């Protein structure tokens, strides 16, 4: 019995020793995990143009209320409501027959006045000859000269009456004064239109259009500085339902004073509209340059994290350890964001894998990547 006990005790000690070795080996393998892999990029320093976004409204340079210049009944409505027309296109036709008759009467009056003028001139010339021979009195001579002058005046009056009658006949054709889009026909065929009173339709020019928008004093000052450095300023414009700013316009007007009630300055952009797709009254979004930065520090937006109302990034040091750094953000520039304060040129920040960082000072395995995707070249900045 004692021999069996000693043998069993030895076996048990060997098993315990082996178990302890396995436990220490397992602890050694799990106590030091490898540093997590993260994507890091170097802070960019490059010149950018900062732009501000404003809300504006599209307006027509010319809005015309089409009214007749003569009275009469409408014989024809010669346009489709809402269509594009050119300057000079026929819109309405007023019954021309009364005005044609006036033209004929004026022509007859002119012919009569011309005949009387010719006779008066012949008699005046004869009177000048006879008075020289003392065949008639000076009084008769003066009367014939006055009659000739009166005949010339009556002829001129008849010519003016004919011109007026012909103009009124032309005015029976109501044409488009400018190129643009027509509105609803207010007076239809068969109805009476009164001269200078009845509104027949409205007409708005559509190419180009104006976009009016207002800027606050701070942004206005920056824009004025840039405008002074260049004769023209290109603006990017987007309309309701559009993504981004697919259209371009030129700034052509800046108001001469700031509105004291709103503290804003009014601007106007010219927006080409050759196909008439845009309509006056539409809302528009306008991007205008407000500042040029010669050396802006930029990082990818994915690198920025939030802690309540603060923004911070993870900076990777030369020893590949992580340090959180609070930053002050500026405007966004495409996928990048301007850093006003908190970073220096050449520093590395984590752009992917921030969820793997659990504590300041922990080591990481940095994988260098570009701060900006190669295909992205947008330098248009908006307020963050």
Image: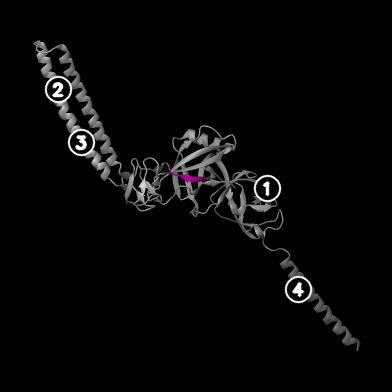
Whole-angstrom CA distance, mark 1 to mark 2, is 103 Å
Q: Which residue is mark 4?
A: 22
| Picture quadrant where residue 127 is located | top left
Q: Quadrant of the N terminus?
A: bottom right
The label on residue 326 is 1
Q: Which residue is mark 3?
A: 107
Whole-angstrom CA distance, mark 2 to mark 3, is 21 Å
Question: Would you say 106 lies left or right of 17 here?
Answer: left
Pointer 4 with pointer 1, Cβ within 8 A? no
* Residue at screen point 22% across, 27% down: 154
**Sooner in the amino-acid sequence: mark 1 or mark 3:** 3
**Sooner in the amino-acid sequence: mark 3 or mark 4:** 4
Q: Secondary structure at mark 1?
A: strand
Whole-angstrom CA distance, mark 3 to mark 4, is 127 Å
**Sooner in the amino-acid sequence: mark 2 or mark 3:** 3
In the image, residue 18 lies in the stretch drawn in magenta? no
Whole-angstrom CA distance, mark 4 to mark 1, is 46 Å
Q: Which residue is mark 2?
A: 121
Within-10-Å neighbours for mark 3: few <14, some 14–19, many 20+: some
């Amino acid at each position: 019995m004692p021999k069996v006990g000693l043998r069993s005790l030895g076996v048990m000690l060997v098993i315990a020793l082996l178990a302890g070795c396995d436990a220490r080996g397992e602890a050694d393998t799990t106590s030091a995990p490898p540093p997590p892999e993260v994507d890091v990029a170097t802070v960019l320093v490059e010149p950018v143009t900062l732009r501000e976004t404003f809300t504006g409204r599209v307006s027509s340079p010319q809005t015309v209320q089409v009214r007749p210049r003569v009275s009469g009944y409408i014989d024809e409505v010669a346009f489709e409501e809402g269509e594009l027309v050119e300057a000079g296109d026929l819109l309405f036709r007023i019954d021309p027959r009364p005005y044609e008759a006036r033209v004929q009467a004026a022509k007859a009056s002119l012919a009569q006045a011309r005949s009387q003028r010719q006779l008066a001139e012949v008699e005046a010339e004869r009177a000048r000859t006879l008075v020289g021979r003392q065949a008639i009195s000076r009084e008769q001579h003066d009367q014939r000269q006055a009659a000739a002058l009166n005949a010339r005046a009556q002829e001129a009056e008849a010519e003016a009456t004919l011109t007026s009658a012909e103009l009124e006949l032309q005015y029976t054709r109501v044409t488009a004064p400018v190129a643009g889009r027509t509105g609803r026909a207010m007076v239809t065929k068969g109805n009476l239109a009164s001269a200078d009173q009845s509104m027949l339709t409205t007409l708005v020019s559509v190419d180009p259009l104006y976009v009016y928008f207002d800027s606050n004093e701070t942004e206005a000052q920056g824009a004025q500085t840039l405008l002074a450095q260049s004769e023209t300023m290109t603006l990017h414009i987007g309309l309701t339902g559009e993504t981004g700013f697919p259209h371009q316009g030129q700034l052509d007007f800046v108001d001469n004073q700031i509105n004291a009630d709103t503290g804003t300055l009014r601007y106007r952009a010219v927006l080409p509209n050759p196909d008439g797709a845009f309509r006056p009254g539409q809302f528009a979004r306008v991007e205008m340059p407000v500042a040029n930065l010669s050396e802006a520090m930029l990082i990818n937006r994915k690198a920025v994290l939030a802690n309540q109302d603060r923004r911070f990034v993870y900076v990777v040091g030369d020893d590949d350890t992580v340090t959180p750094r609070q930053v002050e953000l500026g405007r966004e520039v495409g996928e990048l964001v301007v850093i006003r304060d908190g970073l220096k040129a050449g520093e590395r920040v984590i752009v992917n894998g921030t969820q793997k960082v659990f504590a300041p000072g922990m080591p990481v395995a940095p994988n260098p990547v570009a701060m900006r995707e190669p295909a992205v070249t947008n330098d248009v900045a908006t307020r963050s």
